[in-house]
Image (tube, rainbow, N blue to C red):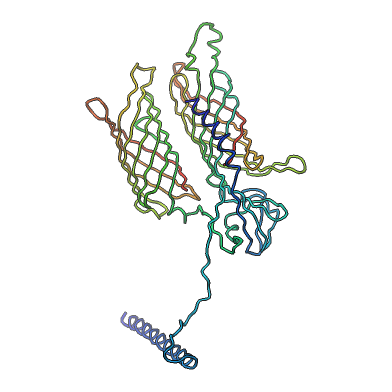
Amino acid sequence: MESRYFFLFLGRRLLLGILLASSLFMGGCSMLQQSASLTADEEVPPVIDPEVERRDIKVPEIDSENFEVGVYGGLISIEDFGTDAVVGVRAAFHATEDFFIEVAYGQSEAGRTSFEELSGAVELLTDEEREFTYYNLSIGYNVLPGEAFFGRKRAFNTALYVIAGVGSTEFAGDDRFTINAGFGYRVIVNDFLALHADVRDHLFDIDLLGEEKTTHNIEYNFGFTIFF
Amino acid sequence: MNRFLYTWAFVVLFVLAPTAVAKSEVELVVEEPFIELRTGPGRGYPVFYVVEAGEAITVTRRRTEWFEVVAPRGKKGWVHREALELTLDPDGFAIRVEDSSFGSYSNRRFEMGVMDGVFGSADVISVYGAYAITPNISTELAVSQGIGTFADNVFATVNVVHQFFPDKRITPFFTLGGGVLRTSPNATLVEVEDRTDEIAFAGVGLRAYATRRMLLRLEYKTYVIFTSRDDNQEIDEWKAGISFFF
């Protein structure tokens, strides 16, 4: 042990000695040089004179377009209540080239169940309760970005995306926690306009017909958005 | 509500959209031997053109980490942020564009996110926005909807968040806040009036930097609802979510 410390100690002393000697030597050399060119009262210039100039950096104001807002319309199949028209608005924020978050609000109006049609006078829901409105917050991932060619001269950037999220559906007199999942196709037509085709399943629990069950309400829609 | 949304959509589409078209353009000069232009704003799009050193380019817009540039002879393509930083402005100044990597995470200012979880026995969805007053302390505004079997809630809260290690990838945080909660008992069960109560809460959580501008967030909050009844009501909430910072 002792010998190890000794060597360490010796090593450090040796290193210090070499450093000291070399700096003295260098100092001596530079003094010789200086004395040759300078008089005694002139200021000693720095030994190292870096030639690296400090670069000014500018942060240009570039218009960033990561937001997308738009409208859509299509059809939604409300389980047990037939298929009806749906319209909605959506806004998305593109966080990276892969991920985006989307907020959507849509509304439709449910039709009549087969039971209501057959029985004639029975009405399960009032007109107000038939209003079907939903909002959702979803995360999308552009799985297949690419280009689509229209004729010989036109190419459009496109993306097939998968999207899923949570939200709430107001239907049959109650708010229902809703999970949505689906996929869509986005075609960027020009600098600011994009066309969308989207398929989405809205899943929520409903106990309207006695027993609580999970319903699948599949929607498909077309729409356009504007990037800004 | 519907009328409001449609008005909003109208404003966005016909008032904001035209202003978005009037864009600011930036002229730059390529300094490196060359930069590559891609056909789209993504890593997979093919390189179709190369702009040589000394040639001027005009940057027209940015989408995420990609910039649309117009090269001499009208060639229009997309370059990545890293490539754009190898250009100079016409006066010879180096260019630096806002980065969205971990480096910019520690000096973020704004944040917005969505969260999902349980509020008592109800499912809850929240949207929040945050503003960082100092690296450690930020203030948040959140709107949540709780959807339960017996009652639905909508609540808006304001809170202060203290993050212990703001420059670490994962940091615990502590929060205190308050707000208002509107409860609507489900009509099918009993005919009860909606009620609005004040709420206060304390919470702890974890925030983790994921990638680019994205954060993951996990939190637990304990709420006290100051009801008009004899006893205050206490509710626990667990949530997980994703947020983005600017």
At horizontal 59% and vertical 64% (from top left) the residue drawn is B92
* Camera-nearest residue between B193 and A137: B193
Q: Is residue A115 above or below residue B53?
A: above
The count of marks equals 0
* Camera-nearest residue between A135 and A189: A189
Q: Is residue A188 above or below residue B39?
A: above
Provide residue B205's location: percent of width, then percent of height. 36, 45
Provide residue A158's location: percent of width, then percent of height. 65, 41
Task: Report whether B59 appears left or right of A207.
Answer: right
At horizontal 49% and vertical 49% (from top left) the residue drawn is B213
Quadrant of the image containing the C terminus of chain A: top right
**In the orientation shown, which residue stands out farthest toward the right?**
A152
Provide residue B193's location: percent of width, then percent of height. 33, 19
* Camera-nearest residue between B131 and B171: B131
**In the orientation shown, which residue stands out farthest toward the left?**
B230
Provide residue A106's location: percent of width, then percent of height. 53, 27
Q: Is residue A73 above or below residue B105?
A: above
Quadrant of the image containing the N terminus of chain A: bottom left
Q: Is residue B123 above or below residue A48?
A: above
